[in-house]
Image (cartoon, rainbow, N blue to C red):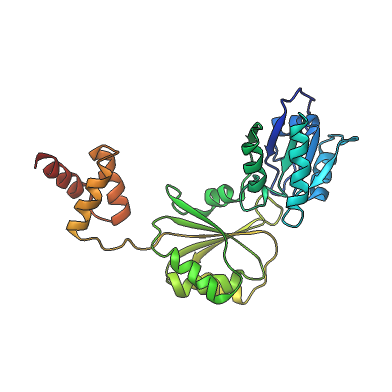
Amino acid sequence: MVNHKEVKLEAGLYLVATPLGTARDITLRALDVLASADVIAAEDTRTMRKLLEIHGVPLGNRPLLAYHDHSGERERAKIIKALEAGQSVAYGSEAGTPMIADPGYHLVGEARSGGHMVTSLPGPSAVVTALTLGGLPTDMFTFAGFLPNTKGARKNALKALEAVQGTLVFYESPKRVAAMLADAAEVLGGAREARVCRELTKRFEEVLSGTLEKLSAELAERSVKGEIVVLIGKGAATVVTEEELKEELALLLVDMSLRDAADRLAEDTGHKRRDIYQMGLKMQRD
């Protein structure tokens, strides 16, 4: 059992990151806030009760509100009322960091617009955990949440991400992951590197590696369970003409040094950094 202590909290909304699976993946500060808040709100109250029990944090007579997609407006009003009464409210998502693909952002917006203090207690995140395990580039990534359920809409969403020069990150249902990978292979190219990260931090944690074509074929023959994060590596850089390169370089030089601009364009376009740098020197002389 991790030690916790009750502390005097300022009135406001405290966003508490909760474990993805392993209960001990929680910060001491998070436990202090959960032990001290006047009100606790949770995306899943059963998960929150279990977490409090594991760490010996008594709920006592404090309210435990269920704040999720189906109760958001009603429960949000209760939370705002508590803030207006000068109380401290701790909000935890079902797993991971609040506001990342969950209903909490409406709550933060309303709390801020009402002039209430809002702060975040950093901790576990499935997005970051998957990126650290996947072995794909992390210098630039785009989190796209859940793709649409229907095939046509899903393909359109993937098509809109085709030109993104960075690792793509998705949440996906185990029931749809095979279909999603097949559509991604068709839209983005079957040779593109990908990872399927499953049950992160839990007993059956697994990272499947390969191309989109390989993974879509593998998962078409195999059923999987648990929470899933899909990573898709960046595609081939778009062919850029010399004139387009000059225009882009001129825009970048407004806000950054030639050295940094050359680094950025070389990474984004695949052109040699030395050539871009020399182009920039010439532009500056002219």
Question: Residue at left 57%, top 51%?
Answer: 127
Question: Residue at left 70%, top 61%?
Answer: 226
- The image shows a total of numbered marks equal to 0
Q: In the image, is 15 to the left or to the right of 2?
A: left
The quadrant of the rendering that contains the N terminus is top right
Q: In the image, is 60 to the left or to the right of 253?
A: right
Up-down: is 180 above or below 274?
below
For the question of whether residue 263 can be seen, the reply is yes
Q: Farthest residue toward the right?
A: 61
Q: Quadrant of residue 84?
A: top right
Q: Can you give x and y, in whole percent of width and height, for residue 282 in the image?
A: 11, 44
For the question of whether residue 190 can be seen, the reply is no
Q: Can you give x and y, in whole percent of width and height, for residue 225 in the image?
A: 70, 65
Q: Can you give x and y, in whole percent of width and height, for residue 37 in the image?
A: 78, 32
Q: Farthest residue toward the top?
A: 8
Q: In the image, is 162 to the left or to the right of 118?
A: left
The quadrant of the rendering that contains the C terminus is top left
For the residue pair 191 and 124, the one nearer the viewer reads as 124
Up-down: is 87 above or below 260?
above
Up-down: is 94 above or below 158?
above
Question: Residue at left 67%, top 41%?
Answer: 17
Q: Can you give x and y, in whole percent of width and height, for residue 23 in the image?
A: 75, 43
Up-down: is 114 above or below 127?
above
Q: Quadrant of residue 50?
A: top right
